[in-house]
Amino acid sequence: MKRYLIILLIMLLPAGASALAPEEVMKKSQEAFLYQGKDFKARVMMKLISKGGQERIRELTMLRKNYGESGGAQKYFMYFYQPADVKDMTFMVYKFPAKDDDRWLFVPAINMVRRIAAQDKSSSFVGSDFTYEDVSGRDIEDDNHTITKEEKLDAKDCYVIKSAPKAQDVDYSYKLSWIDKGSFLPLKEEYYDKKGELYRVFSADEIKDVKGFPTITKRTMKNLLSGHRTEVTYTKADYSIGIEDSLFSERFLKQPPKKWIE
Amino acid sequence: MKQTLKTNNQRLIIKSKSFLSVVCILCSVLCLLSSAIASDVSLHGFVQGNYSVNTDTSNPDGSDFKWAGERAQLKIETDVEPLRFFMKTDVFYDHIDDASKLELREGYADLTSSSYDVRIGRQIITWGLGDLIFINDVFPKDFEAFFSGRPLEYLKKGIDGIKLGMYPSFASAELIIIPFFEENNFPDPDRFHLFDPMPLITDREEKKPSSTFNNTEVALRLYRDVAGFDASLYFYRGFFRQPSMLPDSLTAPTRIDLFFPKLSVYGASLQGRALEGVFSLEAGYYDSREDRDGTDPMSPNPQTRFLTGYQRQLWEDFTLGLQYYLEYMHDYSAYKANLPSGFPLEKKIHDLVTVRLTQFLIHQTLRLSFFSFFSPAARDYMLNPEVKYNFTDNIWAAAGADIFGGGEEWDQFGQLDKNDNIYIQMRYEF
């Protein structure tokens, strides 16, 4: 009897969506969003736009290298061009699964490399509407995932996944993600606060093919409570460019190699 | 703070040394040359107003300002393969001295290869883990800038020398060679009320170590990762950057020579993630080479210095930093036995506790910060609250206060008791 029920259920499910568990979808999404290629480079332009329309610019080169499988360790290297008071600043992150990041900051005015505390993953990244977790990802195991529905978004078939944090370690009570069934990139994310109200929305505004990898080259995070939003554009995006392990060191934090930051 | 007592706090006039001029001219010429051949030249800098007003009493010379000046800084950078040139120079007008001045903050050439790099010229070097506490950072500082409400970067002074970086697989190394001695800059006795153990002797002469081969300062740092911790070993051979007093007679002095005793430092540090934050340990042995047995009352005794620090983000954009620092004077009984009368007796153990609180608000454009020193041994303190706001990406302003007190009139911060000030810094950066 049970067997017939299962067959019946499978027949009722829409074609092509049958086998994937929500965790699988999120895993593939994480891979497509944050782990493509052996390494990755992009020039990142962030526009922080207030409700009144005042803009602030954060411009940086981001370099990322994978160590191990998707969901595994990664190293990030960032070099800032703008604004003027942070020009030549560099920032390095060693990201580990299921463990706090190691972070280092180089302050050029006094030629100092300093480790910085990195516990709060929901802290804003350089004052933008993106958090550190939005930039470098969140462990899949930290949330309970369920597929709430499947629907089209911008003519693309999507899974809609609800992710509820197991611990009270972030500001939201749950997140809904629209994951493209084709590319597995998140096309939209909605963050709901503890009262269940929608307050933060992510959207992928432009997706381009870079070396065969679909890549979100324009994205926006909007805070509905403050009216503040951050628009991010990636230019010069590239994958598997042969970033050396040695880049992620104090030496190059102090003297970022020209070939990587131009 | 035995050395503190021995300084005369003589004001350091920014001198245009011949070496400085040469580097300055060299860099300018190279920059111009390279721009002429259409190479990439990057030009940045700022225009700044910085004023600090006494809140307690006027300066000893009657002025009400600890600092008042406008300043423009230019940063020029260019590449002429395989070299890179960088120059950071300030032009400023000092309202207290009523004079305009030129200061080369940094000016150097870089040569980089895969396994080593060399930097020659005036450069700022920062070592060690302390937050405003320095054990293995033996490089020159400007404490007057720090106490008079200037931006923090002015606490550091450049060295004129060579830095060689080497990167073999087992560890990285930085070797610094400094042929031209540069002392610390201490508060000017015309601007600051300070303790002076021999106030009546005004005939004083500073004797800096001459630039000979034997006097060349050498500093070495070896560092690598050890089980996820950043580990460093340090070595320095040179001089104390704070002058000691040498009176012509201890019973009836008529003049004082200010000299810089020989110093070697052996140190180590370790920093990493622990207890949900960043944990730091640093130590150094100060080998006072001219007073190893502690019997010379005019040279500092050997010391061991320890620092432990902890930093943690408690909630979004709020960071707490705590430090405990301790210095232990060796051969204390010899020091006590030889201390001339009239000089205040230092403690065998001097310590400091620091607290730093930082809160960012409004998309990290508003920063509220608080820093305090407190010495459990001397019971003196310094407090530094500050508010900084970035009006736009190019314009920011900061306002804060330096408050000193407690302890005795000769203690590190106790002697600064009458120098409380509030300050403002405004900057347009491009």
Image (tube, coloured by chain):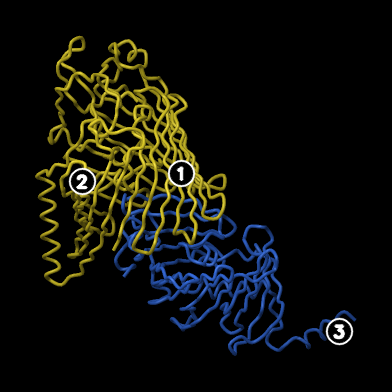
Chain colours: A blue, B yellow
**Which residue type carries mark 3?**
Tyr
Please tell me which of labels 2 and 1 falls first in the chain: 2
Q: Position of residue A31 (x, y in %)?
A: 55, 73
Gap between marks 1 and 3, in whole Å? 69 Å
Q: Position of residue B223 (x, y in %)?
A: 37, 45
Gap between marks 3 and 2, in whole Å? 90 Å
Identify the residue at image location x=85%, y=81%. Answer: A3
Dot 1: chain letter: B
Identify the residue at image location x=43%, y=76%. Answer: A233
The label shown at residue B370 is 1
Please give the residue where the numbered disc 2 appears in the rendered image. B94
Q: Position of residue B251 (x, y in %)?
A: 20, 9
Q: Does residue A135 lie above or below A15 as drawn? A: above
Q: Position of residue B58 (x, y in %)?
A: 29, 33
Q: Nearer the viewer, mark 1 or mark 3?
A: 1
Judge from the rendering whether residue A141 lies leftward or rightward of residue A205; answer left or right.
Answer: right
The label shown at residue A4 is 3
Q: Secondary structure beneath disc 2?
A: strand
Q: Does residue B186 lie above or below A138 as drawn? A: above
**Which residue type carries mark 2?**
Asp
Q: Does residue B298 lie above or below B215 as drawn? A: above
Q: Nearer the viewer, residue B272 or B22?
A: B22
**Which residue type carries mark 1?**
Phe
Q: Quadrant of the C terminus of chain B?
A: bottom left
Q: Nearer the viewer, mark 2 or mark 1?
A: 2
Gap between marks 2 and 1, in whole Å? 28 Å
Q: Nearer the viewer, residue B152 or B172?
A: B152
